[in-house]
Amino acid sequence: MAIRVTVAGATGWTGKAVVAAILKSSDLTLAAAVSRSAAGRDAGEAAGLPPAGVKIAPGLEEALAVPSDVVVDYTAPGAVRHHVLTALARGRHVVVGTSGLSAADYNVIDAAARTAGRGVIAAGNFSITATLLRRFAAEAARYVGDVEVIDYASAGKPDTPSGTARELAETLAALKRHPTAKPLAELSGVIETRGGAIGEGTPVMVHSLRLPSFVLACEAIFGAPDERLTIRHDAGASALPYVAGTLLAVRKVGETVGLTRGLDSLI
């Protein structure tokens, strides 16, 4: 039986590509779609495909009136937490591709998912190669304790750091490391130039650049005496890299309960 999917943010950069992929899939079906700007349009036509017979709803509440199994959210940082909690309360599993959630937000979502007996898979980046960045960096951190993260994005990106950089920093911070850089409390000058400390355990400094010409990029820079290692991921201008990981999460989320961060456990 096909998995019925509701896509919130159905006409956005990634959401539109996800809708198109679902419509072309043999084991997934588009149950409903959400986009305030395209409400009333056919979801297939909005994705550049033939009509799909699914009218785009203006909000998630309206879309959830149609039976579905999984909600995919590619909306905006200010809306995603409410969307996830609403979907869980209505008995749906959720896949979250929207970045900008805090650790506190994820704690609330995990508790709500466990109460509802549903699964949530959230990733700051559903790209397989971005997932490998996180995995390879975690391996490097076993041997090199000093690491910082640089996050690059376009000038208009609203959240900082990116979800990719946040998840990478949180992963590295949780590992047993012994960095040699001076603690913030021992520094003088403009302390903010050291970046933001992210993660529980041994926080990792993250520096976010927001400039024209960048799409998304993230790098972990490791430093040891007389040598450095840089592990970097660069995203191109299309949403294609995120589609395969999103659909993988859609297919797997029904087997989970509670929150799963990232694709690491799925690949």
Image (tube, helix red, strand yellow):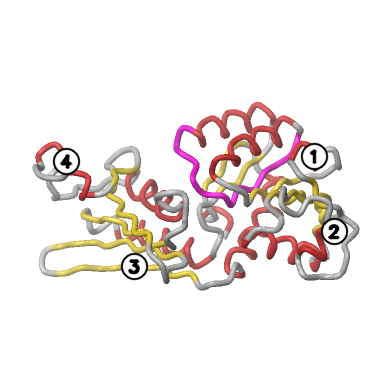
**Nearer mark to the viewer, of 1 and 2:** 2
Amino acid type, mark 1: Leu
Q: Which residues are magenta?
A: 91-104
Q: Which residue position is annotated with label 1?
A: 64
Asked which secondary structure carries label 3, the reply is strand
User: Marks 3 and 4: in contact by CB < 8 Å?
Assistant: no
Compare marks 3 and 1 and give the one earlier in the sequence. Answer: 1
Q: Which residue position is annotated with label 2?
A: 42
Residue sitting at x 86%, y 70%? 50
Residue at the limit of the structure toward the top, as seen here: 115
Would residue 28 be counted in the magenta stretch? no
Measured in 3D between alpha carbons, the distance from the residue under mark 4 to the one under mark 3, in whole angstroms, is 25 Å
Compare marks 4 and 2 and give the one earlier in the sequence. Answer: 2
Measured in 3D between alpha carbons, the distance from the residue under mark 1 to the one under mark 2, in whole angstroms, is 17 Å
Residue sitting at x 42%, y 60%? 155
Q: Which residue position is annotated with label 4?
A: 184
Measured in 3D between alpha carbons, the distance from the residue under mark 4 to the one under mark 2, in whole angstroms, is 53 Å
What's the mark number on residue 22? none
Other residues around mark 2 within 10 Å, as few (<14) / some (14–19) / many (≥20) = some
Q: Which residue position is annotated with label 3?
A: 231
In the shown orientation, is residue 257 left or right of residue 132? right
Amino acid type, mark 3: Ile
Compare marks 1 and 4 and give the one earlier in the sequence. Answer: 1
Residue sitting at x 55%, y 40%? 78
**Nearer mark to the viewer, of 4 and 3:** 4
**Nearer mark to the viewer, of 3 and 2:** 2
In the image, residue 129 lies at what x, y percent?
49, 68
Compare marks 3 and 2 and give the one earlier in the sequence. Answer: 2
Asked which secondary structure carries label 2, the reply is loop
Measured in 3D between alpha carbons, the distance from the residue under mark 3 to the one under mark 1, in whole angstroms, is 41 Å
